[in-house]
Amino acid sequence: MANQNCIYCLERDANSKDHTPPKNLFPKDKRNDLITVPCCKKCNRSFSKDEEYCRAVISSTGQSQRNPSAKEILTGKVFRSLERDQAKGFRNYLRKSISPALVYSGSGIYLGRGSKIKVQMERVYNVIKKTVQGLVFHETELTVSDEYEIKSQYIDSVQQVQQLFTIFRNCPIKRIFSDDIFSYRAGIIEENTPISSWLITIYDSHIFLVNIVKD
Ligand SMILES: [Zn+2]
């Protein structure tokens, strides 16, 4: 491929390859069907801290721990990386973001003390955004210039989840990676532009709706 530009900054030469979805969500033996996209080393490096943060949050929250790969990632990778000396800052940060909370069931019954995590959603959305940019390129060979905006939304209502899966049921673009670690469904709304809607799931537990719109 001659003179391909980085699909993220659209400026520098693509002298590197980026995995999409992020490979750190996958145990080593389940990475063989990942997609790679051309990018520059600078962009590639710039994602790594947010990707590590996103992995820690996503694998440890919601229903993720029902997924065997999420379990493997959390106990094998996230916990181990938090043991490292260099992770002191990140470890303190996580400790500070977890605050004691009183836990109630849906019908208001007191269940005891638990903890709640203040999540920096912006950092999670950064990872979702670059992931969708990569998927757009893989599926359509289009890039997302700054004429467009990528809007990500975390879906946590069961009713909305059901509605979205109904809407996306017959969408033309669909792929589920091994063990339900990651899936995407998409509909292109305007041909020859990146204007599209994406339904992303991670560990069959966290669901994001991503819309690419004209800015
Ligand atoms: Zn770049």
Image (tube, helix red, strand yellow):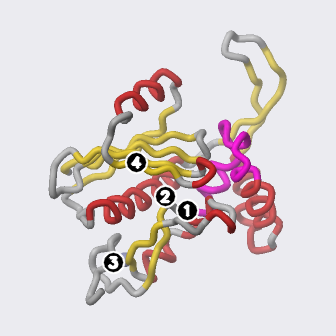
Q: Earlier in the sequence, mark 4 or mark 2?
A: 2
Q: Quadrant of the N terminus?
A: bottom left
69 relative to 144, above or below? above
Out of 4 and 89, give the one closest to the viewer. Answer: 4
Mark 2, ligand 1, within 8 Å: the answer is: no
User: SS of the residue at dot 3?
Assistant: loop
Residue denoted by label 2: 127
The disc placed on residue 50 is 1
**Image position, residue 12 (x, y; %):** 31, 83
User: SS of the residue at dot 4?
Assistant: strand
Residue 189 located left or right of residue 152? left
Residue 200 located left or right of residue 54? left
User: SS of the residue at dot 2?
Assistant: helix
Q: Earlier in the sequence, mark 3 or mark 2?
A: 3
Residue 62 lies in the magenta-colored region: yes
Q: Determine the CA span between mark 4 and mark 3.
A: 25 Å
116 relative to 145, above or below? above
Q: Are marks 1 and 2 in contact (CB under 8 Å)?
A: yes
Q: Earlier in the sequence, mark 1 or mark 2?
A: 1
Name the kind of residue labelled 1 in the image. Answer: Asp
Name the kind of residue labelled 4 in the image. Answer: Lys
Q: Earlier in the sequence, mark 4 or mark 3?
A: 3
Q: Earlier in the sequence, mark 1 or mark 4?
A: 1
Q: Which residues are magenta?
A: 51-71
Give me the residue at 67% from left, 37% from top: 63
Q: Residues within 10 Å of mark 2 (few under 14, many from 20)?
A: many
Residue denoted by label 4: 174
Out of 92 and 104, give the one closest to the viewer. Answer: 104
Residue denoted by label 3: 6
Out of 189 and 106, give the one closest to the viewer. Answer: 189
Q: Are marks 1 and 3 in contact (CB under 8 Å)?
A: no
Front position among marks 1 and 3: 3
